Image (tube, rainbow, N blue to C red):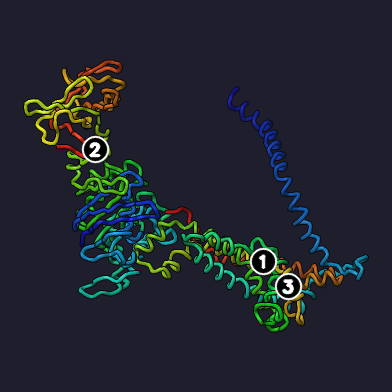
Amino acid sequence: MSGVTFDQVTKRFGDVVAVDSMSLEIRDQEFMVLLGPSGCGKSTALRMIAGLETVSEGELRIGDTTVNDVEAKDRDIAMVFQSYALYPHMTVRDNVEVPLKTRSYDVDGDRRKLRKPERADRVAEAARILGLSDLLDRKPGALSGGQRQRVALARAIVRRPEVFLMDEPLSNLDAKLRAQTRVELVELHRQLRTTIIYVTHDQVEAMTMADRIAVMEAGRLQQVGAPRDVYARPANLFVARFIGSPPMNTVDGRVRVDGGRAHVEVGDGRLDVGPRTGVADGDAVVVGIRPEHLRIAEDGVTAHVRAIEWLGHERHVYCDVAGTPVIVRDTDPGEDHAAPGTDVRVQAAPDTVHLFDPSTTERID
Amino acid sequence: MSATEATRARPSWWRRRRTREAGLAALFLAPSVVVFGAFFFYPIGRIVYLGFFQQNQTRTRQRWVGTEQYVEVLTGDEFREGLSITVRYVLYTVPAGLVLGVLLAVAANRRLRGIKIFHTIFASTVATSVAVASIVWLVLINPTVGYLEVDWLRDPDRALFGVALSSIWQNLGLTFIIVLAGLQAIPEEINEAATVDGMSPTRRFFTVTLPMLSPTLLFLVVVLTVFAFQAFAQIDILTNGGPAGSTETLVFKIFQQQQGGAVGEGSVMAVGLFVITFLVALGQFLLLERRVHYGSDRA
């Protein structure tokens, strides 16, 4: 078991910088999710750990070993690919057994190739954990998407590697199966107690499974933290807008400080933002408020209601605030005090209002 | 209309419609039937028919000799000798051509700057006619002006080998293109999975690449074998069957018989060659099919 450390790691493809001076410490036994939109460098980062891409600059360590020059086949990692990448001409049993045949393993302090019965035991155990025992003699072509995905997982866990790498392993599954597999992966992680590094663009997967999330954009690490922290205290506008569904509302505003309390002027109204140290009177800011923290109230900022989406347990009120689209997520839609085409006022509690610097996009506290 | 009436009424329009559909089907099939009939079935029938006759030198008259000629020619020394040379030629060309094609394709199947230039060079023999390629080869191994100072084509023990080398080279372009296409159809993630699973490149080649390439290789074995059975132009140009008849394959002997006016005997040999080629190809399919993996999907 071991962690993975990126120390100022850069990856270039020709003139394109895919990963830009990334420093990240992934702890032993941690479930770390690399989250970001496509092309943000998260897959490249994962592939560098696997040894499928070289490191252009910086140092990459698995445990205490620098692996920059260690070949993929000699790294103690296992990977689950998006397409599962099963060997179509082999049975499930043979697929799972492949990594056991190619490597040497520590058996009672002795490093050697596994014998046939030892391999069979390990395959059987992995199959049992993933519920594949009845499918061992089938070929991948005869399996469903979910079953193939589990074979790919079995092929990874049978090695008992130091680190698991997963590259969007759920993206080829339907919504229901994806939700179910998320739970299973978390259970698997608890059972195996191994480091898992998981790449996804799906914030729901990140929020539900991760111990910590590393949000990436344009090759750069934006924020690293527990899902709760990343959600509650986004480090910059990108993270604020990327995490959360519907996303955080952001509108331009201007700070007014009087008598120790700060307000922001948005459109024709004012929002109380409580005591803030990082702003001065007259500063231009970007105001961020999550849809569930906005409520329709007697006073606050004028919002012109454009449309209302009724979802049963909640409703989303789409409005315009000072020319910017804003969504109010109303979880208590019992009483109806908004209608499309009318103006309402929206309000938020001071501690739910996030402020960002419009030029650096960084968070202001 | 009641149900009984409906059932009774059905056959008449049913039959009309069936007739109309059959007519339409015949219309669609007509072009292929005409082409195959004129250039395939008729010539085969005609050759089988000619095998029952003996012609005079000027081919103005023919005499019915019946199945006797089939027995005589197919059990004769000439046919056996031609067949033995043909089989040797197949054994010289097919395995070597296949191995070389696979090696070349594997070597060229990587992302390198300018690799397309090599793809084009390796594939170029496809666009070269057998005649041109043979003449290039002839000059290349000419003992006086050639680059290789060998005189294989005039040595009865080596002439067939010399012709085979030329054919291997000529077929290499086709083999290369088809194997390269087969290699590129293997998903990159499968190769990466093999690497992460700890396979060395050699092991990966034998446990992943070759099995996934097997449908391509089966196709090539059959096609190259048929090519070898039918080789003619290169033999005609390089050795003209010589020296001392050492490169007279069945096709070459058939050609000579026909030239010499022995149309009947030549026809019998042609039928013999057809049946043998057919059985060999069929045998290869049946034998190799069981060991071939057709990737039904890219799981």
Numbered mark located on residue A240 in the image? 2
Numbered mark located on residue B227 in the image? 1
Which quarter of the figure has residue B265? Answer: bottom right
Q: Position of residue A247 (x, y in %)?
A: 27, 34
Q: In the rendered image of this protein, does residue B82 appear above or below residue A46?
A: below
Q: Chain of mark 3?
A: B
Q: Position of residue B172 (x, y in %)?
A: 60, 67
Residue type indicated by callout 1: Phe
Residue type indicated by callout 2: Ala
Q: Chain of mark 1?
A: B
Q: Secondary structure at mark 2?
A: helix
Question: In the image, are marks 2 and 1 on the same chain?
Answer: no
Residue type indicated by callout 3: Ile
Q: Which residue is mark 3?
A: B235
Q: Position of residue A56 (x, y in %)?
A: 33, 59
Question: In the image, are marks 1 and 3 on the same chain?
Answer: yes
Which quarter of the figure has residue B242? Answer: bottom right
Residue in view at x 63 percent, y 72 percent? B93
